[in-house]
Structures are given as C-alpha cells and as structure tokens.
Image (tube, helix red, strand yellow):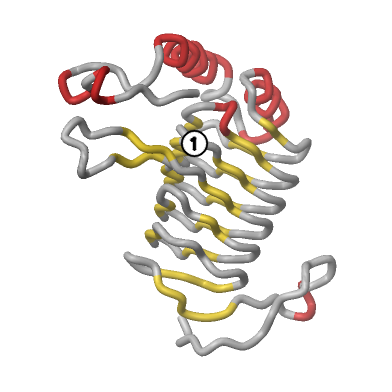
Amino acid sequence: MTILDAHLSRPLEGGPSFSLGNRMFRLVWRLAWVLLAVWTPPPMVRWRRWLLVRFGADMAPTANVRSSARVWYPPHLSMGDHALLGPKVTCYNIAPVHLGRRVVVSQGANLCTGTHDLADRHFQLVARRIVLEDHVWIAAEAFVGPGVVARQGAVLAARGTTFTTLAAWTVYRGNPARAVKRRAFRPETAEGAPSVPTGGNFSEL
C-alpha cells in the first residue's frame, strides 16, 4: 500500500491520501465487517478470525478480535497466539501493526500508525509501524502512537499515551507515559511465563 504524494493529490483541498484501489478494498472490507462480524457474540471468534484472514490478515489460530474492534487495513495486521484486540479498539494500521504472543489491547485503546509532516505545507501523511512484543498489555483507552515498539512484557496503563519505545517488563502510565515500576509475576502464577528481570528504581503505582 502506497501513500499518495500530498503535493500532487492535495488532501487539504479534498484530494485522496490513498489510491482508488486501496479505497475500494477498504470499502468492501468495512461492509464485510459490518454485515458479517459486528453483530457476532464473543464466542464466534473463529468466524471473525477467518474473515480477517480472508482479507489478508496474518492471524495465529488462537488470536482474537472482538466484534466492535475496528481494523483499518487487514493486510497490515499480524497477531500471535492468544493475542487480543478488545472491544472498541481502533487499529488504524496504515502501516503494519504486529501483536506478539499473549498481547492484550484492552477496550477503547487506539493503535495509530499515521501522522503528518508538520513542515510540509501540503500536510503529507506519514506511516510508521507499531510492534507490541510478547506479553505486552495496552490497557483501556490508552493511545499508542506511530513508530512505537513495546518490548516484551511492557504495560501501558489505562488512558496512558506513548510515542516512544516502552522498555521490557516495565509499567508506564500518564500522558506522556512514564515508567513507574517493574513488572514481575508472582511465583504461584509464573508457570510457563518467560523469565522476568528484576530491579529498577521506579516509584510504586
């Protein structure tokens, strides 16, 4: 998928940012999701996953996208085992978005890969991918901006906002998000979990 040159397409004057083919594909995709998925209850996850794959998404057999989530462009979505896009999540993936194993993106969160060149008088659209590594949690109504990489086990707390890389096994909160503590599993819940580093000078939540 190619973003059109704003100097030629003039989006501020009503011109398109994407090709006609891309726009038609997304129109068909939106209609398909509304007609075939929006009404489905949570247990129909296999059907929604199948539909996303038919439109080009790379979905692990246990990945889960809730019916009220919005995926802008399925070919730019990849999800690992037991990854979840929760209710009313917005996945604005004009660039690729990757969710690793057991990633949770909670209700109302926003994954936004698009921004604009502020120095360009034509307001050129720019796309940067988002990568959420294994065991990341993006909590309710949080915002993840273009180009963000959330390292393994990172957490962005509810309504947090980040435009920068999140360190592994670290909890962030606020706008802009700041590291507040390390994340570690309790011994009784750690079976099968990856090794978690300890240490770090962070205040408690």
Q: Which residue is mark 1?
A: 95
Residue 144, relative to residue 124: is it above or below?
below
The residue positioned 63% from the left and 65% from the top of the image is: 153
- Residue positioned 43% across, 52% down in the render: 144
Residue 58 falls left or right of residue 191: left
Residue type at mark 1 is Ala
Q: Is the residue 23 above or below the residue 158 in the image? A: above
Q: Quadrant of residue 118?
A: top left
How many marks on residues?
1
Asked whether 120 or 75 is in front, the reply is 120
Query: For the residue labelled by badge 1, is the local secondary structure a helix, a strand or a loop?
Result: loop
Instruction: Choose between 67 and 57: the one closer to the eye.
Output: 57
Question: Which residue is rendered at x = 42% and y = 55% of the image?
Answer: 142
Q: Nearer the viewer, residue 175 or 150?
A: 150
* Relative to 14, 97 lies left or right: right
Placement of 164 over or under 100, stated as above or below: below
Residue 160 placement (x, y as % from top left):
39, 62
Q: Residue 122: x and y, percent?
A: 19, 30
Q: Position of residue 97 (x, y in %)?
A: 55, 41
Crowding at dot 1, Cα within 10 Å, few <14 / some 14-19 / many 20+, comes out as many
Work out whether residue 198 or residue 108 is closer to the camera in this orientation and state it. Answer: 198
Percent from the top left, x then y, of residue 45? 68, 32
What residue is drawn where x is 70% and y is 34%?
Answer: 59
